[in-house]
Structures are given as structure tokens and as C-alpha cells.
Image (spheres, coloured by chain):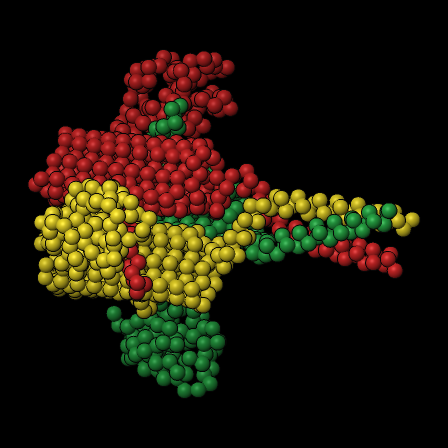
Chain colours: A green, B red, C yellow
Amino acid sequence: MEFTLAQIAHILNGELKGNGQVKVNRVGKIEEGGEGAITFLSNPKYEPFIYKTTASAVIVSKGFKPKGEISAGLILVDDPYLSFTALLEEYHKLVSFQKSGVEQPCFFADTATEGKNTYRGAFSYVGKNVRLGDNVKIYPNTYIGDDVTIGNNTIIYAGVKIYSRTKIGNYCTIHSGAVIGSDGFGFAPQADGSYKTIPQVGNVVLEDHVSIGANTTIDCATFDSTIIREGVKLDNLVQIGHNVEIGKHTVIASQTGISGSSKVGEYSMIGGQVGLAGHIQLGARTKIAAQSGINKSIKEEGKILFGSPAFDHLQYMKSAMLFKRLPELNQKIRELEEKIINLTSLKTDDEH
Amino acid sequence: MEFTLAQIAHILNGELKGNGQVKVNRVGKIEEGGEGAITFLSNPKYEPFIYKTTASAVIVSKGFKPKGEISAGLILVDDPYLSFTALLEEYHKLVSFQKSGVEQPCFFADTATEGKNTYRGAFSYVGKNVRLGDNVKIYPNTYIGDDVTIGNNTIIYAGVKIYSRTKIGNYCTIHSGAVIGSDGFGFAPQADGSYKTIPQVGNVVLEDHVSIGANTTIDCATFDSTIIREGVKLDNLVQIGHNVEIGKHTVIASQTGISGSSKVGEYSMIGGQVGLAGHIQLGARTKIAAQSGINKSIKEEGKILFGSPAFDHLQYMKSAMLFKRLPELNQKIRELEEKIINLTSLKTDDEH
Amino acid sequence: MEFTLAQIAHILNGELKGNGQVKVNRVGKIEEGGEGAITFLSNPKYEPFIYKTTASAVIVSKGFKPKGEISAGLILVDDPYLSFTALLEEYHKLVSFQKSGVEQPCFFADTATEGKNTYRGAFSYVGKNVRLGDNVKIYPNTYIGDDVTIGNNTIIYAGVKIYSRTKIGNYCTIHSGAVIGSDGFGFAPQADGSYKTIPQVGNVVLEDHVSIGANTTIDCATFDSTIIREGVKLDNLVQIGHNVEIGKHTVIASQTGISGSSKVGEYSMIGGQVGLAGHIQLGARTKIAAQSGINKSIKEEGKILFGSPAFDHLQYMKSAMLFKRLPELNQKIRELEEKIINLTSLKTDDEH
């Protein structure tokens, strides 16, 4: 895909300095550049690169005053970083939504319906009463169970498995191998130590602009809904238990697990390999360091947590530093013990 | 699916108080209820809800004496919790075993055989010499390699991959994306630092009533069998290494990994994100807290373990509490050092 | 598959003692053996087994002098362990490369090409401009996106998903459910707390002799390539972030995660459930204990790391031992405090 600088200046509502007919076909880093690349300058420490870059175009601030020759075309905007990310998103959509039509063989139940301009790849399976919106792209080898609804402009990559009754919003992206709506881990213990399966009759709801990573698993609720709110981004191999609710615009890194019935506040950031116990609640804007374990509710907003079990991250870092120094502390205690024995015996000597 | 209260009283061998023609079509919580829901009362602290519930029926103990008006029909049984879970399991089976027949296209090798009332979804693959029992349900996009046997009443959800020679029992459930029987992680180090692959010629055996979570992986044995005993429940994204044996009725939560050749005792409970080293053995009824790491055998029965490396959970909680207080302990040590310097100098002063 | 001892002696360039017409059809342990099994004796402590083994053949050192009767045929070589692993690898290839031909239905784009003696299973999908080498084996229900290249003698097991533009070398093995080339976790934060998706336009490169475990995920690079070097072995459920580079002949155990842009040195060994932060570098021959967390670069070669955050493993083990003894250290501090109070009061008493 190619765009002229004139087109891009128009899309970004920016001012063009240079040849509007020059074409760009990819995004790149200012320090790498290359013909056909468009990049941006936001952080002043990267300014030296703009005089050397071989990129075809750079998005810069309207206030930018060059201190030397620049070979690239310039697009002047209010906020180069925001404009660049807007451009990225446009590009992302164009690339992602190229596919359309139906590849055979694929399976589409009689009672399923779909909107305009969809793509359904070979060996994709669409069950009974499924509703697919406009522009939905379903890659090959994907399974969509009965009674699922999928909003407009949502992309389901190859080999995704979506269980019955799941509801997916608009502008969602689900990466390969993700499993949405599998049974929650519910087993009722019996007197003899065995377990009976508790049927999981709820579902999963993904609101709009949700992104789900590869091989991530989201369990359906026991009765009602496991809910992933608007704008949430889950990385690969994340586990979301039954009846969990993830607040809007929260980001969760790879291999983290959220146990059943827990709630994570909006705008939170959770690192990789974190574990949350079941039935706990975290406030909005919570940040959790990688590999932490959270075993109780912390409802205050904006807490930064670290450790397993986790507590305040600054406190944790102090404790972790002293953990490393434990042999030294142990040695000090031993020395103190000896000194006190000496002092005590001196004392006793005095008393003779 | 709908049942009359008379039918349910009959199934549970219970006594009905109320209109036997009332219909229920789902299970629910006593505090939520709703027309058509059936629930139960076991824990006395929930008794107040029985006078307010809008559920159509409640399973109660034969000894229950109402202290007010109840609008729901009552089914009196010996143990309401057990009866409710039995009902759940019946319901679960009914819901899960609805599908039957063959959806085209699917692949079924000439030498494969199957029992009565099976379901084989579109794009499912059944290899050479596979034996499928009665009532086996194979959802779409599933792969079953050569020489696999699957017992009666087992459900394989969409996109499961089962390698050759795996043996699966009766009444098992395998959720989407699970991989059963992939090669164990066996590589023989060579003098130049590279590795040669050790062929894994064993298999995986799942006994009866085993449940496997979404995207869980179970490696085949190097020579003989990786064994998952009767009634074991594995959550999502669990890793079971080659030659592992999991004792019967053991439950393992999400994202836990059991390394090669380890054995877990029966009736154990293992939390999420736990790691077991290879070649270790744990006794029956072991409990392990989430995120723990077990690096040696603990063969006594009934131990409760916590930490990484793990030890007794009560001891661990004391140490974890003191870890948090390390800055304070460090401060105390410093103060002691100063005091002793003072005492020593006083002492020395005395001696002058 | 069966071989005579004469054939095996020939393959291993060894000397045969016994009947060259005896047939073997599997590898086994010397202590188990059984008719048709071939095994080896390398470690002297296993020597007693050679006089009892029921195996049909044993690979031994040229210098081996029997101290008793041996019923098995012997194959004398320079290094029994190396010869045995070479045999294993041959056997592995024979078993793995048995399949060939095309099962219908499968999808093969007009512009895709393939070499000789390939296997393409039912419901496999091969996208536009894909290049498959000789002897490539693609199992059922596998997805290979547009513009992918796969070298000779590479096996892709059932249900693997390979995104567009991925490059895979010769003699690679990719196990079921692995996802190669999914989007890196890149989102640009916006002023309102939401995120825009950063398009990931790079790819993944697997060099030769790479092995990828079941349900492992490898993200594509943002611009250039995520690189898995020659001979790397990744276990199941491993996560490799965007722009990561794993040095040659490195082994990574199950459920470990390597965050974006990090580099792991060659010949390293990383345990299970380890986490690496983003943008860090580790030297060659680094060893990391299971469940460790690495949050900074350690470029020296040959370090052995343990803990989260990790440091030198011997130091860590000392700290971990003292962590367990923290209640005891705390008690000692309390006793010291009391003794000093006593000493100080005695002192004060003296002064009166």
C-alpha cells in the first residue's frame, strides 16, 4: 500500500513541507529510515537523526525549527506522536481488513447471518444463529459456536475457538489460538473426594476495541457473564477465569492469570506472569509488577504493587534488597551476640 | 431444556412440596432466582433468601422447618448440596451431549471405527485405526491422530489436537486448544553444545472422568505412558511433562507446570502458576498454594506447601510477614550495633 | 520399522558381536529391555544390568570387557552415548517423515509452491506465495499465512498457526497449537488513557534445527524480525515477545516468557516459568533457575541466576535458606534487645 505525502498531510490535517508526490509505503524508526518510510520526531533527543535520516518523510511539531539540512519531506502537526499513532492505526486497519469474500470449503449454518464485506476463510465454522456484523474477518480454521454475536469491524485470526453464546463487540481483534468461553473451572467436591462438574451456563462478553492475544483463554461465567470492558488489551497466554470483570482500557501482559470472580479496575496495567486469587477486587489505575501474586482486595485507586504476596512496590523493593543482604544481616546478628556475651562476662567480672 | 418439579423430585429421589407441573429450565443462586430457576438451601446463613427468592423451586433438607411463607416449590432431600450437584451434573450431560451426527466435510480414515450416537463436526480429522466409543462428541476443527482410542461419553471440544497412540477413557472432557501427546522435551546434549532430538515413542493415557482445560498441553512419555488418573481436573494452560503421573481426583489450577517424570499423589489440590521440578514425588492429599515452586520430593501425605522454594505453609506465612518487615529488622540491627558500641566504650571508660 | 543388528552396526560405523540377523524395532532402557529393544551402556554404574537385560542389543564402548554372560547382541563404538543419540535422531526422522501426499480437502493457493515428497493433511491451509521445501510435512488443520517460506525437512504438526511473512528454516519441528508471528503487544497510549494499536509489520525468523513446543507463541517484530537462532529448543507454552532474539542452541523450558526486544545469548539454558523483562540482554551460556525473574541485562557469559528479581544462584540459595529462618532471626534480635536493655540498666545501676 502506498500513499503520497499530500494524502498523508490531508489525513493528519497537517502542513506539508516538501514534494507532495513522494510516496511512502511503510512506517519506520527515525534512526533507520529508508526510502519509502515515514517516521516522526517527538522526543528532542532524537533531533540529530532528522538531519541524517534516509526516510522519505518525517512528522514533526508545528513549532519545529530545523538547525540544518533535512532531505525528508516534513509534515507539520500539533502533536507528532499522536499523529503518528493515528497514522499507525489507519495503516493497521488497511492491512488487517484487506481480505474479503468466502474461501471454500467453509461451514456456515442455515440460521447464521452476516453483514457486508466479510471474509470467511477456508475451514472456518460458523454455528447456528450466529450474527456477524459488517467487515468481520474470520480467518481459516476458526470455530464459532452457536448463538455467538460479533460486531462490526472485528477480526478473528486463524484457529480461534469461540464457544456458544459469546458476545463480541465492534473493532475487536482476537489472535490465533485464543479460546473464548470455555467452561469455568467449577467442580463440586463430593463426600468421597471426587468431584462433580458444575455446568457453566453463562457466557463471555467482549466490549468494543478489545484485543486478545494468541492462545489466551477466557472462561465463561457460571451463570451470567465474564466481562472484558471496552479497550482492554490482553497479551498472549493470559488466563481469565469465570465471572471475572476487567475494567475498561486495562492492559494485561503475557502469561498472567486472573482467578474466578475477581474484578480489575479500569485503566490498570498488569505485568507478565502475575497471578490474582479469586473473588478479589482491585481499584482503578492499579499497576502490578511482573510475577507478582495478589491474594486480597485492594480497592484504593492508583496503587503500585509488587511481590508475591504483593504489597506497595517501594516497600517491596527495600525488602527485596535486604533479602539479597540476608547473609550479611545474619552475620551481624551473630557478631552482636558475641559482643554481648563478652560485655556480659566483663560485667560479671566487674562484679567479682 | 425443561423439567417439571415432579420429574426432578423423581430424579433426586426427593419429596415434593408444591405444584409438580411447575417447570424449571436452569439452575441459579438462591439470592437471584427468577422464574424457571431451581436452586438449593444448604448453608443456614442463606435461609433468609428462601422467603424472598423468586426461583421456581428450591432443594432443601428433609429436616428444614420454614419460618415464613415460601413462594417456591420445595424438593426435600437428605443432603441438598449433594442433590444439587447431582442435578447439575445431569444437566451438564444433557447440554453437552445434544449434538449428534456428522457435519461435512470431515475426515474419517478407512480403518477408523466409531460407536453409536457420536457427533463429528465439520473439519474434524480422525486418523488411521482410531477407535471412538458410543456417545463420543468431536467438535469441529479437531485433530485425532492415528491409533488413538477414546472411550464412551467423552467430549472433545473444537480445535483439540490429540497425537497418535493416546488413550482416553470414558466420561472425559477436553476443552478447545488442548494438545494431548505432543513430544516430551527431550534433547541429548552433544559435545559441540548442540542437541539431538530424543524420539518420544511413548503415549498419554487419560483414565475415566478426566477434564482437561483449554490450551493445556500434555506431553507423551519417552518410552511408556504419561498417566492422568481417574477424576483428575486440569484447568486451562496447564503443562504436564513427559512420563508424569497425576494421582486420581487431583485438581490443578491454571498455568501450573509439572516437569518430566514427576508424580503427584491422589486427591491433591494444586493452585495456579505452581511449578514442580522434574523427577519428584508428592504424597496423597498434598495442597500447594498458588505460585509455589516445588524442587524436591515430599512423600508424606497431606502436606500444605507454599513458597518458591516451597515449605510448610504456616512457616512460610511467618517468613513472608517478616520479609515485609525486613527494613524494620535491619534498622533494629543497626540500633543494636550502636548501643553496643556505646556500651563498649562506656566499659572501656570504666576501665581507665 | 525394523532394522537388523548388521544394519545398525553399519549405520553407527561400529563392530558387531552377535547375530547380525537379529531384528530391533524400538529403543529402550537397559534396565527394562525386552525383545526387539536396543539400548546402550555408557555410565559404569549401569553395567550390572547388561548381564540381565532382555534387550536384543546393547551399544557399548570398544573398550568394554564383559565380566559375565550377555544374552544381547553388542555393537562396539567409540562413544556409546553419542552413537545412541545419533540412532535416536535417525529413528526420530524415520518415524516423523513417514507421511506423504495430499489429503482432501485442503487449501493450497494458486501462487504457492512446494518441493518433493511433501505431506499436506486434510483441512490444512497454505496461503498466497507460500514456498514449501522438500520433505515438508504439514499436518491437518494447520494454517500457513501468505508469503511464508518453509525450508526442507521441516515438520508442522496439527493445528499450528503461522502468520504471514514468517520464515522457517530446514529441519525445524513445530508442535501442535503453536502460534508463530502473531502481532507483538504494541499499543500507543493516548491522552484519554485509551490505546491505539501499533501495526506490527515485521516478521518471525526461525533458523535451522529449531524446535517449538505445543501452544508456544512467538510474536512478530514491530518493524524487522524476531529471531530464533539455529538449534534453539523451546518447550510448550513459552511466550516470545516482539523483536526478541534467542541465541543459537539455547534451550528454554515450559511456560517461560521473554518480553519484547530482549536478547538471550547462545548456548543458554532457561528453566520453566522464568520471566525476562523487555529490552535486556543476557550473555552466552547463561543458566537461569525455574521461576526466576530477570529485570536487568547481565552480559557476562556463563552466569547462573536464580530468584525474582534474580541474582547469583549460590548467593540466592543462601538468602532463601535465611528467608526460611527469618522467624528465628527475628527472635534473636528481640533477645539481643532485651539483653542490651539489661546491660544498659546494670551500667546505669553501676553509675549510681
- Check the image and name the residue furthest to the left: B110
Please name the residue shown 83% across and 49% down the image: A349
| Count of picture labels | 0
Q: Quadrant of residue A88?
A: bottom left
Q: Quadrant of residue A222?
A: top left
- Check the image and name the residue furthest to the right: C352
Please name the residue shown 70% across and 55% down the image: B334
Nearer-the-camera pick, C130 or A232: C130
In this rendering, position of residue A197 left or right of residue B315: left
Please name the residue shown 52% across and 46% down the image: A309
- Check the image and name the residue furthest to the front: C67
Please name the residue shown 35% across and 63% down the image: C267
Q: Is residue A268 visible?
A: no
In this rendering, position of residue B68 left or right of residue C14: right
In this rendering, position of residue B150 left or right of residue B57: left
Nearer-the-camera pick, A252 or B240: B240
Question: Where's residue A231, x and y in %?
Answer: 40, 53
Nearer-the-camera pick, B196 or A92: B196
Q: Quadrant of residue C31?
A: top left
Q: Is residue C41 visible?
A: yes
Question: Where's residue A70, x and y in %?
Answer: 39, 84
Question: Where's residue B272, x and y in %?
Answer: 42, 43
**Residue C72 in the image: above or below residue A31:** above
Question: Where's residue B301, x and y in %?
Answer: 44, 32
